[in-house]
Amino acid sequence: MLLHPFGFAHKCTYFMGAGAGAYDREWHFIPNTPSGYSIDFSRLKRSIKMKTSKHETKTCPHCQKNFECKCGDVINCQCETIELKQQHRDYIFKQYDDCLCASCMAFMRSEYNISQFYQKINQLIEHK
């Protein structure tokens, strides 16, 4: 049960008035919702999850191999196995505008780190 700000509890939806609309659990106004209409949040959540959990087969623009992109379930996507800092993401984004496979992301991360290492070495040599 959720508590309405005016003190009464309601199971799913907070109502504004006769046919004007309703508020959902996060207090977002749902216009044109008939008064007395109850939203089945569990069903809505399953529906949204089904629509957003799509998986795509993509071709890596770096190595040209196919891989599965889980754009609707990013936490379980192969790209989450590679830890990238913002500078790595920027480096990759300057060269590619689409997802890379995990092995190419790791390669690009290493390539960036090596280039930064050599830049620092060259700076040290120049300052001597």
Image (cartoon, rainbow, N blue to C red):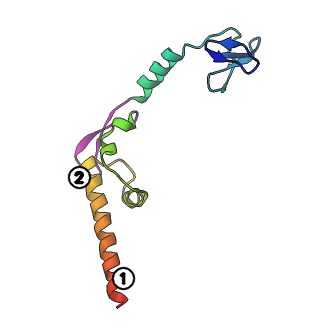
Asked whether 115 or 98 is in front, the reply is: 115
Q: Quadrant of the N terminus?
A: top right
Disc sitting over residue 7 in the figure: none
Q: Residue at x 31, y 72 (%)?
A: 117
- Amino acid on which disc 1 is placed: Gln
Q: Residue at x 54, y 17 (%)?
A: 41
Task: Report x, y in % for residue 70.
Answer: 35, 36
Residue for badge 2: 63
Label 1: few (<14), some (14–19) or many (≥20) C-alpha neighbours in 10 Å: few
Task: Report x, y in % for residue 62.
Answer: 27, 54
Magenta includes 91?
A: no
Question: Please, what secondary structure does the residue beneath circle 2 have?
Answer: loop
Total numbered circles:
2
Task: Report x, y in % for residue 15.
Answer: 71, 15
Magenta includes 57?
A: yes
Label 2: few (<14), some (14–19) or many (≥20) C-alpha neighbours in 10 Å: few
Q: Residue furthest bottom?
A: 128
The residue stretch that appears in magenta? 54-72
Disc sitting over residue 123 in the figure: 1
Question: Please, what secondary structure does the residue beneath circle 1 have?
Answer: helix
